[in-house]
Amino acid sequence: MENKLSLNAPVRTIIVKVLSYDPSITSVFGRTEKEDLFFKDLLTVGCDFYELLELFANNEAINKKSVTCIINNIPSTEVISNVSDKELRRMIPHWSPSKYHTASIEEVCNELKKHIENDSPGTYVYNSNQNYQNKRKYNDTYVLIIANSNKYFFDINRKKAFLICNKEGEKND
């Protein structure tokens, strides 16, 4: 028997529970085998875009069906046409020396550059201090989404989105 969820459960707990279901097996809350509108539905009822993105990303719930919905609802973006090492470092203004980070800042920047240059489709999540033992410790979460040759980088804590273009002002197609 599955664990019952209290009606007094926090919204975050309910969202994580819904995200735990595979939409190809169980359709629930706008998540079906054909489309995944749960992200948009949560935005519609007033949830914050960046809080949702962090939650979806850290629960590995960004899939081919939900990514379009996410990209279509980005509040605003800053266009980046030159993805130099300096520009990548500017997009990641804080990186903790914590042992709980994804990797060193140099390794993260190198991996980001590789994914961007190779146009590697997927969602890549980087945490500067994902300390599960002490949730109160400050953590910066950064997310790179590459889908349909479009590249978006998100700074969750600062609520910033960057659209990465191939050439000056030219959106990837």
Image (cartoon, helix red, strand yellow):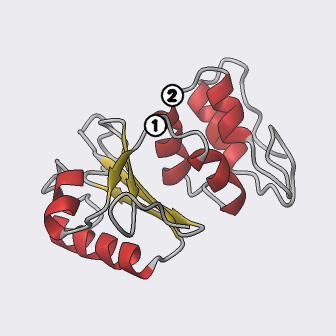
Decide: marks 1, 2 in contact (CB < 8 A)? yes
Task: Decide if residue 99 is in sight here.
Answer: no
The circle drawn on residue 50 is: 1
> Where does the C terminus fall, quadrant-wise?
bottom right
User: For residue 77, what is the image quadrant?
Assistant: top left
Packing grade of label 1 (10 A; few <14, some 14-19, many >=20) is some
Above or below, comparing residue 9 to residue 25 in the picture: above
Q: Amino acid at mark 1?
A: Tyr
Task: Name which residue lies at 22% across and 61% down.
Answer: 88
Packing grade of label 2 (10 A; few <14, some 14-19, many >=20) is few
| 157 relative position to 98: left or right | right
User: For residue 18, what is the image quadrant?
Assistant: top right
Task: Name which residue lies at 42% across and 62% down.
Answer: 170
Find residue 167 and report its horizontal and vertical position in percent: 35, 68
Local SS, label 2: loop
The circle drawn on residue 147 is: none
Find residue 32 and report its horizontal and vertical position in percent: 84, 51
Above or below, comparing residue 118 to residue 157 in the picture: below
Who is closer to the viewer here, 53 or 20?
Answer: 53
Above or below, comparing residue 116 to residue 136 in the picture: below
Find residue 7 and report its horizontal and vertical position in percent: 73, 20
Query: How many numbered callouts?
Result: 2
